[in-house]
Amino acid sequence: MSKIFRAGKTILASKVANKYTDEIKLLTSQLKTTPKLVGLLANDDPAAEMYASWTGKTAESLGFKYELIRVTKDQLEGEIYKCNENDSVNGIMVYFPVYGDSQDSYLQQCVTMEKDVEGLNFQYVSNMYHNIRYLDEAKTKKSILPCTPLAVVKILEYLGLYNPLLNYGDRLYGKTVTIVNRSEIVGRPLAALLANDGATVYSADVHDIQLYERGDGLTLKKHTVLECSKTLEECAKASDIVITGVPSPTYKFPTEYVKRGAVAINFSSHKNFNDDIKDVASLYVPSTGKVTITMLLRNLLRLMENSKK
């Protein structure tokens, strides 16, 4: 007699974020001054507007000051430098995309490393890809990770996908993941983070699929990137976890590609899965935004702590 598969459970980002809010409130209450985050908005993207609104409400509820500064694209670089030099500003975030091309990469580097709550500074990015977790040899200053990829990691931990019996840094060993997005801000860093933690990761975009892994038996300290000849369907059907982040209101990941009992996570502001994903996936996380904001504020506190050492 075949087993009856019960519908999967939907996990809301707010439930995961709640795990960290008490910790953040406690830390902010112990500070002598109220930490200030500035958000710089230079586009009219509704998703960015919504993200800015959530950020402001969450920040203020957890003991931070938040200021949203609206600027034109031409004014943005100058405003970044003003915030860099303003001692009352502890953290800076820019709502991307602005130009949607290499100019955005340049603007990311304009934010000083000491105030980069999004973890997009070259030093942070380099450390992440090379699996270097500290900024100093004494290991007193933790490197900052990009907040959305970090949010997905925390969601996977919350869902029990990380194995606490394995050594730290190896806890995704044995897991296979498909990520549909290879942007420099989320998809590619996320693939690297999960591979550095031991997973086999298929990274898919509109051009091709790449394989991120650490080799047999976790012999390497950091991931390698290999060409992949598999189709998206083959990758997904072999995966314990399917993660999507396609910025399109019309894109839907084929439910029939998802292995029964797998975990499905969407970090796009658009709904990348059809409703029937809950009939196949064991756990479904429809959005990650609130966890991302929580990680962003956590990064800000870490930057302040690093500056003391």
Image (cartoon, rainbow, N blue to C red):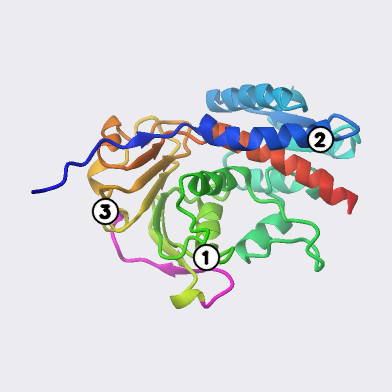
Q: What percent of the width, then of the height, locates residue 68?
A: 73, 24
Of tags 1 and 2, the one toward the viewer is 1
Image height check: is 121 above or below 129? Answer: above
Q: Earlier in the sequence, mark 2 or mark 3?
A: 2
Q: What percent of the width, then of the height, locates residue 92?
A: 76, 37
Q: What percent of the width, then of the height, locates residue 297?
A: 70, 36
Q: Are marks 1 and 3 in contact (CB under 8 Å)?
A: no
Residue 94 found in image quarter: top right
Residue at mark 1 to residue at mark 2: CA–CA distance: 47 Å
Residue kind at label 3, given as amino acid type:
Glu
Q: Residues within 10 Å of mark 2 (few under 14, many from 20)?
A: few
Q: Are marks 1 and 2 in contact (CB under 8 Å)?
A: no
* SS under mark 3: helix
The range drawn in magenta is 219-233
Image height check: is 62 above or below 225? Answer: above
Image point 66% across, 25% down: which residue?
Answer: 58
Q: Earlier in the sequence, mark 1 or mark 2?
A: 2
Residue at mark 2 to residue at mark 3: CA–CA distance: 46 Å
Asked if the stretch drawn in magenta spans residue 227, the answer is: yes
Residue kind at label 2, given as amino acid type:
Gly
Q: Which residue is mark 1?
A: 166
Image point 57% across, 31% down: which residue?
Answer: 290
